[in-house]
Image: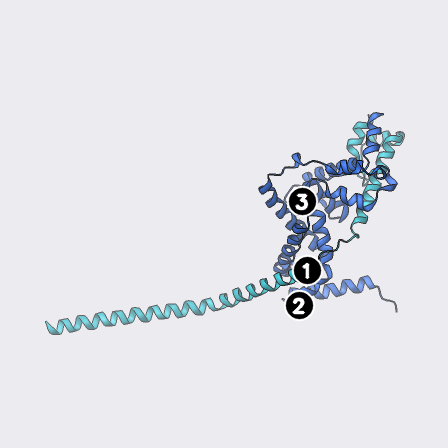
Chain colours: A blue, B cyan
Amino acid sequence: MATDPTAELRAEVDRLVDAARRGDRAAFDELVRRTYVDTYTLAMRLTANEEDARDVVQESYLRAWKGIRRFRGDAQFSTWMYRITANAAATLVQKRRRRRVESLETVDEPIEASLDAQPEAATVSAVGMETLARAVEALPPKLRAIVVLKDVYGLPHEAIAEELGISVAAAKVRLHRGRKRLRDALYEEDGRSARAV
Amino acid sequence: MRCDDVARLLPATVEGTPVDLAVQTHIESCLRCQAELARYRRMLRALQQLRTRFLEPSPSLLAQTLAVLGEESERQAVRSMLSGRRLAYAGAIGGAALATAGTAVALILARSRRRAAVA
């Protein structure tokens, strides 16, 4: 009888989570081995900085280990880790902002300049994934976090708002602003011609 | 309804969120707004694909993360041991304090008896 490899993997992760909840460190280490690339990728998308992403990954797994007994298993372990990572990244970004007095309004949009040098990005069909990744990276941190968590990782507004410490309404407003900025960055040429009509 | 007004609503409507009839009617009759909506939808699809494009961390990240977890586990073990022994320590300290106080009282009583006997 054929077995579903995805279901098998999920069952294995569930088994490791159960063991980790009972205090089995080796099981938790195995969970880390299986998920750290995913967690790192999210951390990089959220922080856009290698060093910060490493700090976020370590902090996230520390929080996960401390809180694994509270994980009830009604969501997937990966989704739970996404939420922890989002929260850890938000905490780190807030700390950095306090130091650098960086505000949303004062952040420039360097991606527009970089996309100007890449005319192929002006057409929809030629939007390469690398260009998209760079455009996301160039978003101001507050907008980037929402776009990444909602549009890339598919977390619901309620979960995003909770982890970032903002209201659901604020999360939605930021998402729309983020999408608009991203659209402007990716389709600058089209935008100009549209505005000229 | 003007294109600029509709354009402001598109980031919120791209996932199929219901819009009022005037907006819907405008989009159905306006090629420019249809193209703009299509752009947003393509952008959203591309963003979803970004999820499976994993970034490669430096080789040391896993080892460092596991080391940090190991240190935390040790701290937890020490804390647990200390909290378990706290009662025993408190009892021992209390007993020692009582013994000291008892000895002091006995010495004082003995001294006062000697003075009374001398007098």
Q: Which residue is mark 1?
A: B60
Q: Position of residue A162 (x, y in %)?
A: 65, 46
**Element on which disc 2 rests:** helix
* Image height of A37 relative to B2, above or below: below
1 and 3 marks in contact (CB < 8 Å): no
Residue type at mark 3 is Ala
Q: Earlier in the sequence, mark 3 or mark 2?
A: 2
Mark number, residue A161: 3
Please tell me whether mark 1 or mark 2 is closer to you in this view: 1
Q: Nearer the viewer, residue B59 or B26?
A: B59
3 and 2 marks in contact (CB < 8 Å): no
The answer as to whether the residues below labels 1 and 3 share one chain is: no
Q: Residue at 78%, 33% (x, y): give it.
A: B9
Q: Nearer the viewer, residue B8 or A89?
A: A89
Residue type at mark 2 is Ala
Q: Quadrant of the C terminus of chain B?
A: bottom left
Q: Quadrant of residue A164?
A: top right
Label 1, label 2: how many angstroms apart (C-alpha)? 19 Å
Mark number, residue A26: 2
**What chain does badge 2 belong to?**
A
Callout 3 crowding tier (Cα within 10 Å): few <14, some 14–19, many ≥20: some
Please tell me whether mark 1 or mark 3 is closer to you in this view: 1
Q: Quadrant of residue B107?
A: bottom left
The answer as to whether the residues below labels 1 and 2 share one chain is: no
Q: Position of residue B76 (x, y in %)?
A: 56, 64
Please tell me whether mark 3 or mark 2 is closer to you in this view: 2
Residue type at mark 1 is Ser
Label 1, label 3: how many angstroms apart (C-alpha)? 33 Å
Label 3, label 2: how many angstroms apart (C-alpha)? 33 Å
**Element on which disc 3 rests:** helix
The answer as to whether the residues below labels 3 and 2 share one chain is: yes
